[in-house]
Image: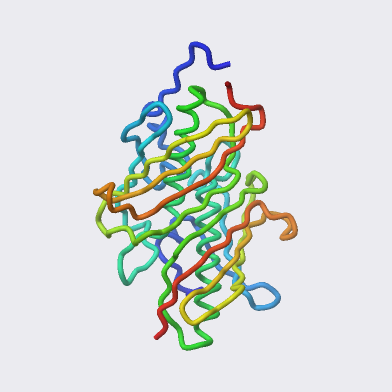
């Protein structure tokens, strides 16, 4: 199914359509089973007007996208799939004004389920602001 | 809170209404801004809607006790059905309002509240006034 096909995350993420375009998420880096995306600070994303801290929703969206791309990289194919569940621990508030960087990794791929994890930070990977774990499911299966 | 939603809620196009019991319900229109794969809502937009519904419900409950600030600790989201080209609604339910921590649940649905497209469970830290 995936023979001869190379999934290109940088190209995939240039699309400005949909929710990712609204939030302003873009490609940063990738490896064999992980992708790093970034979410620039934007006042439209603010969840708390007193502090200027962005809402938790955009961080969840960022990590959903980063882990999803991580799955396609590990599968080396663009497969239709859906998020089954996602848990986010909000370790600390994102710093107002700073770009949030999210790294998502697929650490286990089975016939129909992909297991993912990831972290988000705003400049220092050793000082993460969020940690995520979740699963995706491909109705037609992932290539093995 | 219900009459002054933060910028992120406005970005999602959310509006607030109250159900028959007076509980706040948030309404999210379908559109390109909340689109994931073609024809379906983005999971992040559904989650953002449910988190806002949870926050609104929690502020509503807190106001009856003098108010306070809330900080999200974590969220677990289950996606049950694809979100289609329709209006989505979400309601948060405060299952426990403690002194320092609140447990909140939220569901999102389109036609029938009994057939949710997603559900979320959240813990919040509370700083009382």
B22 vs A74, left or right, is right
Vertical side of A111 occupied by A55: above or below: below
What residue appears at the point 49 percent right and 74 percent down from the top-left corner? B101
Colouring rule applied to residues: rainbow
Which residue: 40% across, 47% down?
A23
The x, y position of residue B93, in whole percent, is 61, 70
- Residue A19: where, in percent of width, then height? 47, 44
In this rendering, the answer to whether A47 lies above or below B100 is above
- In the rendered image, the quadrant that contains the C terminus of chain B is bottom left
Query: Quick one: A111 or B79, which is closer to the camera?
Result: A111
A94 displayed left or right of B31 = left
Task: Tell me the residue at 36%/59% (across/down).
Answer: A54
Where residue B45 appears, as percent x and y from the top left, is 51, 51
Closer-to-camera residue (A126/B59): A126
Query: Is B119 positioned to the left or the right of A73 in the image?
Result: right
Residue A89 percent coordinates (x, y): 44, 57
């Amino acid at each position: 199914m995936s023979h001869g096909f190379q999934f290109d995350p940088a190209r995939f993420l240039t699309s400005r359509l949909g929710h990712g375009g609204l939030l302003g998420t873009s490609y940063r880096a990738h490896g064999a089973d992980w992708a790093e995306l970034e979410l620039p600070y934007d006042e439209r994303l603010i969840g708390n007007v007193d502090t200027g801290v962005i809402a938790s929703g955009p961080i969840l969206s960022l990590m959903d996208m980063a882990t999803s791309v991580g799955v396609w990289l590990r599968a080396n194919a663009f497969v239709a799939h859906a998020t089954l569940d996602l848990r986010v621990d909000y370790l600390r508030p994102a710093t107002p004004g700073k770009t949030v960087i999210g790294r998502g990794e697929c650490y286990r791929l089975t016939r129909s389920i992909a297991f993912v994890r990831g972290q988000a930070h705003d400049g220092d990977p050793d000082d993460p602001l969020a940690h995520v774990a979740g699963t995706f499911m491909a109705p037609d299966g992932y290539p093995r | 809170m219900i009459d002054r939603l933060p910028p992120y809620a406005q970005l999602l196009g959310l509006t607030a209404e109250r159900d028959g019991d007076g509980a706040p319900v948030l309404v999210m229109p379908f559109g390109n801004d909340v689109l994931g794969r073609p024809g379906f809502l983005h999971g992040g937009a559904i989650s953002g809607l449910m988190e806002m519904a949870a926050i609104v419900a929690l502020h509503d409950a807190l106001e009856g006790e003098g108010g306070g600030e809330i900080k999200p600790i974590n969220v677990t989201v289950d996606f049950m059905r694809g979100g289609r080209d329709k209006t989505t609604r979400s309601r948060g339910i405060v299952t426990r309002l403690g002194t320092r921590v609140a447990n909140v649940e939220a569901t999102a649905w389109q036609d029938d509240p009994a057939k949710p497209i997603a559900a979320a469970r959240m813990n919040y830290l509370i700083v009382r006034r």
